[in-house]
Image: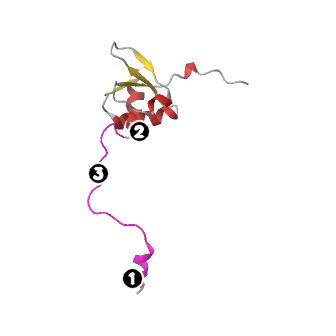
């Protein structure tokens, strides 16, 4: 009886087998590390998962996102534009420039 109550008291269930490894470049930390280390990162047009992560990070101010057009020019995207995660064009992710921020009052 005592053994059953101890087993019933815990709500932790161990699943057998090793944990699944995350795919490279698919989580937020590795994406940020890549962009901050290299300065910029190009995301393929059809990579919806990475674009969704980048859009989330842009909302918090960690990344700038630009859409690469056919002629190679980059058009900055607003957070509202990135939420659609279009697969029409590739994106260029870059670190935000803090020099563009207005000076603090005081």
> Please, what secondary structure does the residue beneath circle 3 have?
loop
Which tag is nearer the camera, tag 1 or tag 3?
3
In which quarter of the view is residue 40 placed?
top left
Element on which disc 1 rests: helix
Of residues 102 and 58, which is closer to you in this image?
58
Q: Position of residue 32 (x, y in %)?
A: 42, 33
Magenta residue span:
5-26
Residue located farthest toward the bottom when viewing the structure as drawn: 1
Q: Which residue is the site of mark 3? A: 20
> Which of these two is toward me, 96 or 50?
50
Q: Which quadrant is the C terminus positioned in?
A: top right
Q: Which residue is situated farthest in the top direction here? A: 71
Looking at the image, tell me whether mark 1 or mark 2 is earlier in sequence order.
1
Q: Residue furthest right?
A: 106
Q: Mark 2 points at which residue?
A: 29
In the displayed structure, 94 sits above or below 59; it is: above
């Amino acid at each position: 009886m005592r053994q059953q109550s101890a087993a019933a008291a815990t709500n932790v269930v161990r699943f057998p087998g090793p944990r699944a490894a995350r795919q490279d470049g698919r989580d937020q930390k590795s994406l940020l590390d890549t962009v901050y280390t290299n300065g910029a990162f190009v995301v393929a047009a059809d990579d919806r998962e990475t674009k969704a992560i980048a859009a989330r990070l842009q909302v918090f101010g960690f990344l700038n996102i630009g859409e690469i057009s056919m002629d190679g020019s980059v058009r900055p995207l607003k957070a509202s534009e990135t939420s659609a995660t279009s697969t029409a064009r590739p994106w260029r992710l870059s670190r935000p420039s803090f020099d563009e921020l207005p000076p603090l009052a005081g």
